[in-house]
Amino acid sequence: MGNATLILGVTGNIASGKSMVAELLQKKGALLLSADQLAREVVAPGTRLLDELISQFGSEILQADGSLDREHLGRLVFADEAARRRLNALLHPAIARLAEQRLAVLSASGAPLVVYEAPLLFEAGAEKRVDKVLVIRIDPELQLRRLIVRDQCDAAEARRRIDAQMPQQEKAARADYLIENSGGLEELERAVDNLWVELIAD
């Protein structure tokens, strides 16, 4: 790999363990950029984008302090395909611009690896921003159970959230690297260790 910094996109479906893998890579020395964090920044109070969201979806998407109520907005768009498309058309370009700026800065740092953790990497066309893509895959039944516990929702709501995303097998087919996260933490750590060696040796 020489001295060039590799940008690795980390994605996978909801409750697959993307953040855990990204954190494990960060502990090994990778620099981490989270699309979710960027998504929060672009709709911070006072931004033009937040004003656009209010005009599209109404002021009930705000919390008492004037910040975006992401859970409320999420419930609105998970149930409505057209609304979700409208939201993504506003969010994705803004996140893309910020991601490109941040990734350029991180790439210039000389770190061996930059991780861009993005749940909607393929859906947003963001794979063009990275050199390689790692997909985290999980057993669908385990995914459902994890999501119910994590988000404290019922099975029907969890299934709706899973079905709103690109199918796992489609993401896996487009990946450069795959990690199966259906076992325990030790197994996951071993898989990340092996991947790190492969990435840094390239």
Image (cartoon, grey):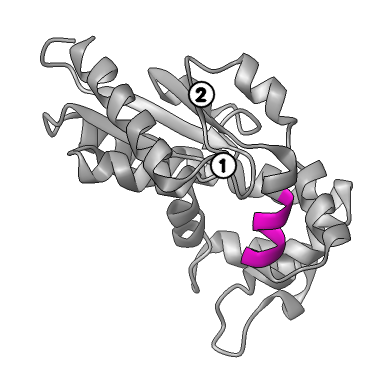
Front in this rendered view, residue 72 or 42: 72
Residue linked to disc 2 = 127
Out of 170 and 88, give the one closest to the viewer.
170
Name the residue rendered at 33%, 23% in the picture: 195
Q: Quadrant of residue 102?
A: top left
Amino acid of disc 1:
Pro
Which secondary structure lies at badge 2? helix
Which residue extends farthest bottom? 64
> Does the rendering let one see residue 85?
no
**Quarter where residue 139 is shown:** top right
Which quarter of the rendered picture does the C terminus lie within? top left
Name which residue lies at 23% across and 20% down.
Answer: 197
Q: Is 90 on the left-hand or right-hand side of 31? A: right
Q: Which numbered disc covers residue 119?
A: 1
Residue drawn at (83%, 51%), measured in percent from left and top? 159
**Whether residue 126 is visible:** yes
Magenta region, residue range: 144-150
